[in-house]
Image (cartoon, rainbow, N blue to C red):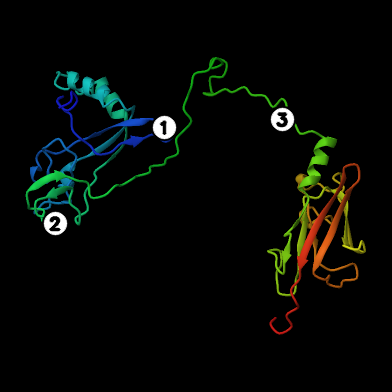
Amino acid sequence: MTEIETEIGRGWFPGFAVNVETGQRLNMMFGENSKTTGDYAANMIWDPSSTELAKFGEPIFGGMQYLYVMSSPYDEGRVYRDSLLEEFNKYNAGNTIKPVFRNFYKSIMYTAVPMVDAKFDIYKRKVPGDKTSEIIGYELPTEARIRIRVRNPLMQFPTANAASYPDSHLVYTFSTKGLAPKLNDSTLKTNALSKINAVPNPYYAFSDYEVNQLSNVVKITNLPDKCTVTIFDINGALVRRFNKDIDPSKTNVSDGQSIEAQTDNLDNAIKWDLKNHKGVPIASGLYYIHISAPGVGERTIKFFGALRPTDVNNF
């Protein structure tokens, strides 16, 4: 036997606990009520039964094998074993709780009284399924994982400025140097042009922007506030032109102005209904979408669309 197995007060528990905030494995403890010997509660092994109450209503609770999760990092329970064995049988004058016991109770994070479901048996039996049969081994019927999540207050750490801020437990110093947005940066503007796209592309007779059977919608996204979007067919003929012109100085919803009162398109996209400038649906095929942004640059996108025939029978 190992040194731990021969120590006084040691038992065996088939599991472990981890503090998900720190990643530390935690000490665990269990107890048993030796009075309920018929429910395995006097053998120093965690093996609760399924018995809840005795014949005359006396609480059994599976042998009262209470389970405790401690706040201390796992050290095989050494921190508690040494202090409890040393102080447990010493005389304590008065009714006060000894500091060692007070600290012990404070370090209990969670406790429970687990019981085994009546249809399971925590032991292997000589006759499987017969709980009165001879025990030939220990076997948990299943594995269980319990997740406990609580809202914890911020931990209090002493700081160098604690004397200057008596009402504050935490004082931080930080800097936003280098994190400020860059205004009118030509390089960033040029790079932003590469994010302009037609969605979906290719278009296969449907998009998520459409609201009924008669609508055809493609969006040209990530456009700057001021730009001209021109669409050509493969022969270079003009199909459609959109002008996007938002004046930031006149459009400011951050001051509380209602969005409904705005006449500008605040979206960074333009909806194209797949019609030409005369309102006639375009033919299926390849198109070129040219974006010109004054002071920024230009970008050309290839777009392919396969339009569905109009359904005049089902709408």
The reply to whether callout 3 and callout 1 are in contact (CB within 8 Å) is no
Rendering coords of residue 24 (x, y %) = 38, 30
Rendering coords of residue 59 (x, y %) = 15, 48
Q: Amino acid at mark 3?
A: Leu
Q: In the rendered view of the protein, which quadrant contains the C terminus?
A: bottom right
Residue highlighted by disc 1: 23
Q: Amino acid at mark 1?
A: Gly
Residue highlighted by disc 3: 179
In 3D space, how far apart are the residues under numbered discs 3 and 1 (Cα atoms)? Answer: 32 Å
User: On the image, which quarter does residue 276 sit in?
Assistant: bottom right
In 3D space, how far apart are the residues under numbered discs 1 and 2 (Cα atoms)? Answer: 40 Å
Q: Which mark is residue 129?
A: 2
Rendering coords of residue 297 (x, y %) = 88, 44
Give whichever of discs 3 and 2 has the lower sequence position. Answer: 2
Q: Nearer the viewer, mark 3 or mark 2?
A: 2
Q: Amino acid at mark 2?
A: Gly
In 3D space, how far apart are the residues under numbered discs 3 and 2 (Cα atoms)? Answer: 68 Å
Can you say whether 140 is above or below 108 in the image? Answer: below
- For the point 93% across and 64% down, the residue is 237
User: On the image, which quarter does residue 84 sit in?
Assistant: top left
Q: Residue furthest bottom?
A: 313
> Mark 1: few, some, or many residues within 10 Å (few <14, many ≥20)?
few
Can you say whether 195 is above or below 166 in the image? Answer: below
Q: In the rendered view of the protein, which quadrant contains the N terminus?
A: top left
Q: Secondary structure at mark 1?
A: loop
